Structure formats: C-alpha cells, structure tokens
C-alpha cells in the first residue's frame, strides 16, 4: 500500500538553482553546435587577373626585340616592283631608289649649318671675353681661335623622303657598328628611338640578301596620324650599319608593302 501511495503522488519539482552556485561546467557534448545550426558558407572573393611582369621591352630607351618575337629565317624575295623611272635618294654613306612621287627633305644640311653657326657664335663670344679680360689685365691676349672644320666629322646619314598625297615617308639613318654588331643590335637601336607606341606583327631575317638584313613590320598608333604601319629594315655593311624605315597608313599598307620591299632591294652602300 505504501508503494501504491508513493506511485500516486506527483513528483516534486526540482529546487531552483541557487545563485550562489557557479555556472554549470560545459561538457564535451555541450561544446558541439546544435544539429539545426547551418554550416557557414565560404564567401567567394573576386580574384584579380595577375599583371604581366615588367620586362626590358617596356623601356622605350632599351628595346629588345628578342624578348618579344624570335626571328623567322626567310628566303630573300625574288619578285619586286619595277623600278623604272625611280629616283635615287643619295646620302653620304648609302643610297636607296624611290618612286618619283617621293620628295627628299634635306635635314642634314640645315643641321650642319646650325652647328657651324653655334661654333662661330662661340668663337665670337670667346674673342669678346678675351679682349675685355686683356683690357683689365693690361695685356693683349691671343684672340684668334683655330677654325673648326665640321666637314671632318664622320660621315652619317639622316635622310627623309615624303610622298605628300599619301603622307607616306622613308627614313634612312646610318648607325655605328663594331666587330660584334648584329642586325638585331641595329634593329634594337632603331626601335628604341621610336616615339610612338607600336606592336611587332612580324619579324624576318633574310638568309640570301645582298647584305645581312633583318625586317620587322610594326603596327603603330599615332595621336596625330592615327593607325599606321612601319616596315623597318636593319642592314649591316662592312663598315657601317643602317636603319631603313618605311611608314604609311594602315589602310594603304597592302598597296605600299611591295613598293617598300623593292626600295629596300635597291639599297646600295657607298664605299
């Protein structure tokens, strides 16, 4: 009967937790997240496209074509535009034949005249200074400087020819060469002097040319003239080297390329 009475009694409520008791110690199971807790989703961050590493080709004063495009060994062309009636663009170190529509622009003569004028102005200023100094010191200094002959400078060429109707140009520039100079060296020198931004589209080294010769074709972006094409030849002679550069608009490139090739074939170095 005691068991029956005990079963009939309602269970006593557990005593409230005392404030004096410490916080219940967490168990290992209590440290796990509840089963309904969503797993955190990884946030995908946008990735940046890696930028190309800077190379010497990005230095306009030290261009290196070998880092951009290897030379393709190509046979020298055997078919050229007829050069009957063409005129010779004569320089001190070389000459090249051009269509009669191209007119030569004399750049070297005015440059030499300007240099001569600078020398004469310097000599005159030195004379005036020496005479005034002699008056102060009570002496008569020698005020007649030795004349400077600019004609003794090494021969060089900087020739330009222009076709006004198409604004196409031809530039012949002589360059120094040493025993180890290659056509690639001459080409790099010419490309380092270009002021417009360009993209190399082809590069050929001719294996049967009359002289060691290399050619590149460039796509040019010019602020004033727009898109254009330049055909640059690097030519190596026994004692000198040259950059022969042809330029025209992108729209006329297909028409003028055979003309430029024929003009390059006419190149003749002077002994």
Image (cartoon, rainbow, N blue to C red):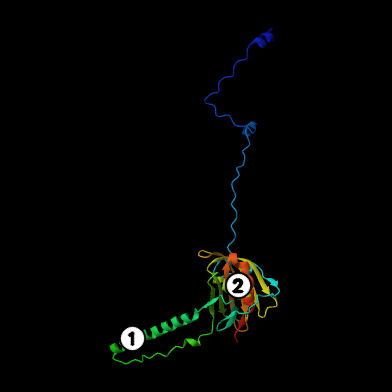
Q: Quadrant of the C terminus?
A: bottom right
Secondary structure at badge 2 equals strand
Mark 1 neighbour density, 10 Å: few (under 14) some (14–19) many (20 or more): few
Left or right of residue 104, residue 4 in this image = right
Separation of marks 1 and 2 at Cα, in angstroms = 49 Å
Q: Residue 185: x and y, percent?
A: 61, 75
Left or right of residue 142, residue 206 in this image = right
In the depicted view, which residue is nearer to us: 237 or 145? 237
Which residue was labeled with disc 2?
Answer: 232
Left or right of residue 167, residue 208 in this image = right
Q: Residue 128: x and y, percent?
A: 33, 86
Which residue was labeled with disc 1?
Answer: 128
Indicate the quadrant where residue 17 lies.
top right
Q: Nearer the viewer, mark 1 or mark 2?
A: 2
Residue in view at x 69 percent, y 10 percent: 3
In the depicted view, which residue is nearer to us: 237 or 56? 237
Q: Which mark is residue 255?
A: none
Residue in view at x 62 percent, y 73 percent: 259
Q: Residue 156: x and y, percent?
A: 54, 82
Q: Is residue 55 visible?
A: no
Mark 2 neighbour density, 10 Å: few (under 14) some (14–19) many (20 or more): many
Q: Where 20 falls versus 133 (above or below)?
A: above
């Amino acid at each position: 009967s005691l068991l029956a009475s005990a079963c009939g009694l309602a269970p006593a409520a557990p005593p409230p937790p005392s404030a004096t008791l410490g916080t219940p110690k967490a168990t290992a199971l209590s440290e796990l997240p509840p089963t309904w807790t969503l797993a955190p989703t990884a946030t995908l961050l946008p990735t940046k496209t890696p930028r190309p590493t800077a190379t010497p080709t990005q230095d306009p004063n030290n261009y290196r074509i070998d880092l951009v495009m290897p030379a393709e060994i190509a046979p020298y062309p055997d078919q050229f535009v007829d050069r009957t009636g063409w005129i010779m663009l004569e320089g001190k170190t070389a000459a090249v034949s051009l269509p009669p529509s191209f007119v030569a622009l004399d750049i070297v003569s005015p440059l030499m005249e300007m240099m001569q004028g600078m020398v004469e102005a310097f000599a005159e200023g030195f004379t005036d200074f020496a005479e005034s100094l002699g008056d102060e010191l009570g002496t008569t200094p020698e005020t007649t400087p030795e004349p400077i002959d600019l004609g003794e400078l090494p021969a060089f060429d900087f020739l330009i020819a222009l076709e006004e109707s198409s604004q196409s140009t031809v530039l012949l520039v002589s360059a120094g060469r040493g025993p180890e100079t290659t056509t690639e060296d001459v080409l790099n020198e010419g490309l380092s002097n270009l002021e417009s931004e360009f993209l190399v589209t082809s590069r050929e080294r001719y294996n049967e040319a009359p002289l060691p010769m290399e050619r590149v074709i460039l796509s040019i972006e010019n602020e004033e003239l727009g898109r254009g094409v330049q055909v640059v030849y690097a030519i190596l002679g026994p004692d000198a080297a040259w950059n022969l550069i042809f330029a025209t608009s992108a729209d006329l490139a297909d028409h003028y390329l055979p003309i430029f090739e024929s003009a390059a074939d006419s190149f003749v170095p002077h002994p």
